[in-house]
Amino acid sequence: MSEPSDGARRRLDEVFGDVLPVTTSDERDDRDAAPAARDEQLLADRPPHHDRD
C-alpha cells in the first residue's frame, strides 16, 4: 500500500486529526519505556489464586 499524497494526508488530518503515528511500535526504539514498571503492574494484577511467593 502506498503512502497518501501530501494533499490527501492534510485532508485526512483535517477530518480525522492526527490519531495514528507515522511509524509503528516495532519501528521505534521504545527501550526507554521502563520495562520494570510494566512488570510490577503485571505482577500486581495477578489473580488471587496465583502463587505469590
Image: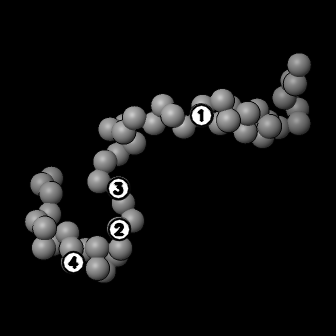
Give yes or no for contact between labels 1 and 4 (Cβ–Cβ under 8 Å): no
Q: Is 9 or 31 nearer to us in this picture?
A: 31
- Secondary structure beneath dot 4 equals helix
> In this rendering, which labeled residue sits more in front, label 1 or label 3?
1
Q: Earlier in the sequence, mark 2 or mark 4?
A: 4
Residue 42 is at least partly visible in this image? no
Residue 7 pos. (x, y %)? 12, 73
The quarter in which the C terminus is drawn is top right
On the image, numbered disc 4 is attached to which residue? 11
- Secondary structure beneath dot 3 equals loop
Q: Earlier in the sequence, mark 1 or mark 4?
A: 4
**What is the crowding at mark 4: few (fewer than 14 residues within 10 Å), some, or many (at least 20)?**
few
Type of amino acid at the residue the image marks with label 4: Arg
Q: Quadrant of residue 16?
A: bottom left
Type of amino acid at the residue the image marks with label 1: Ala
On the image, numbered disc 2 is attached to which residue? 18
On the image, numbered disc 1 is attached to which residue? 34
The residues bearing labels 1 and 4 have C-alpha atoms spaced at a distance of 36 Å
Residue 21 — which label? 3
- Residue at figure coordinates x 40%, y 42% from the top left: 25
The residues bearing labels 4 and 3 have C-alpha atoms spaced at a distance of 16 Å
> In this rendering, which labeled residue sits more in front, label 2 or label 1?
1
